[in-house]
Image: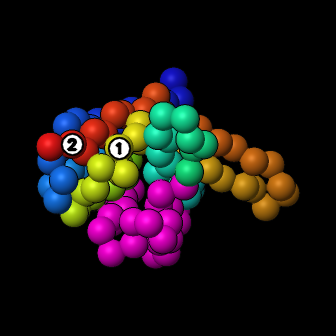
Amino acid sequence: QVQLVESGGGLVQPGGSLRLSCAASGFTFSTYAMNWYRQAPGKERELVAGISSTGGSTNYADSVKGRFTISRDNAKNMVYLRMNSLKPEDTAVYYCNAKKTTDWGMKYEIWGQGTQVTVSS
């Protein structure tokens, strides 16, 4: 069964930290780029951070640069998002996403069910 399962969300005070985890199964994890998206109430889903299939390249939304770190462990089929200095505006449902485009142009995409992060005092 192809799936992504997020964990680690919760309620945290402004300035606090959380680490989100995403467990992948049912597909060849090491061949997919992995991403974290988030969606706040009333807003569109946005890309927060991405990491290449090997982990050699990462990218971040400007709003989280310097505060969030994405990483992956291909031996464990896991991807992580370390979130520091959290702000109320980081409150959202965070989604794990896997993407791959093959050499012949076939696109594959997998989504997790999401985990709620709430930053509030």
Q: Are marks 2 and 1 in contact (CB under 8 Å)?
A: yes
Residue 40 x/y as whole percent? 47, 40
How many angstroms separate mark 2 from mark 1 (CA)?
8 Å
The residue labelled by disc 2 is: 120
Span colored in magenta:
47-74
For label 1, the crowd category at 10 Å Cα-Cα, with few meaning under 14, some 14 to 19 and many 20 or more, is: many
Please tell me in which quadrant of the rendered image residue 66 appears. Answer: bottom left
* Dot placed on the residue nearer the N-terminal end, 2 or 1: 1
Residue 7 x/y as whole percent? 29, 36
Q: Which mark is residue 91?
A: 1
Left or right placement of residue 99 versus residue 50 in this view: right
Regarding residue 64, the answer to whether it shows in the image is yes
Residue 121 x/y as whole percent? 15, 43
> Residue, x 22% and y 63% (percent of image)?
85
Q: Secondary structure at mark 1?
A: loop
Regarding residue 27, the answer to whether it shows in the image is no
- Is 51 inside the magenta-drawn segment? yes
Up-down relation of residue 1 to residue 4 (above or below): above
Q: In this view of the protein, which residue sits in the foreground, 30 or 56?
A: 56
What residue type is disc 1 on?
Answer: Thr
Q: Which mark is residue 62?
A: none
Q: In this view of the protein, which residue sits in the foreground, 75 or 61?
A: 61
> Residue, x 84% and y 57% (percent of image)?
104
Q: Secondary structure at mark 2?
A: loop
